Amino acid sequence: MSAEIQRNKQQAVVRGFMLRCPSCGVGKTLHRYLKVKDCCDHCGLELHHASVDDGPAYFTLMVVVAVIFPLFAIIYANFDPNPLVVAISMMALATALALFLLPRVKGVFIGLQWASRLHGF
Ligand SMILES: [Zn+2]
């Protein structure tokens, strides 16, 4: 009964976004960009239980599309840009945004799994 202490989901999400351990907030959850560490360096929490599959990739894609598509509309509604310049700059922005968000979203998923005690956490 004492093992079922409520875990703070909001704190786990924030720590996951910061790429930190959902339990202690100090150790890192990922190494080599997207690889989940076996355990936290600081508190020893076993992180190999995390099973996020393609969820972070799909969620990241949705966020990137939700940011990029309105930008196209705003740019073409207010300016008369060269389409090639817009296409190249939007591809670069989309790539940079996806590379920035993907590990953070994966950290959020791991934090939510830990807070919800899923997959052996
Ligand atoms: Zn930790």
Image: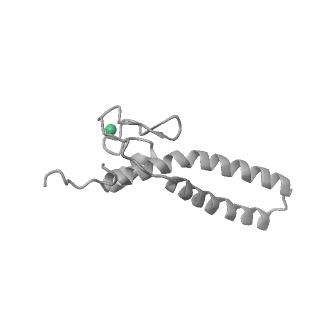
Q: Is residue 48 above or below residue 94?
A: above
Residue at the spot x=38%, y=50% of the render?
Answer: 111
Residue at the spot x=69%, y=50% of the render?
Answer: 93
**Figure coloring:** one colour
Between 59 and 9, the residue placed more toward the observer is 59
Q: Is residue 59 left or right of residue 92?
A: left
Residue 17 on image: x %, y %: 45, 48
Residue at the spot x=40%, y=41% of the render?
Answer: 20
Residue 95 on image: x %, y %: 67, 48
Residue 38 on image: x %, y %: 38, 36
Q: Is residue 109 above or below residue 78?
A: above
Residue extending farthest to the left is 1
Q: Quadrant of the N terminus?
A: bottom left
Q: Quadrant of residue 25?
A: top left
Count of marks, rendered view: 0
Residue at the spot x=48%, y=52% of the render?
Answer: 53
Q: Is residue 29 above or below residue 70?
A: above
Residue extending farthest to the top is 41
Q: Where ligand 1 lies, by image quadrant?
A: top left
Q: Is residue 5 left or right of residue 51?
A: left
Residue 90 on image: x %, y %: 73, 53
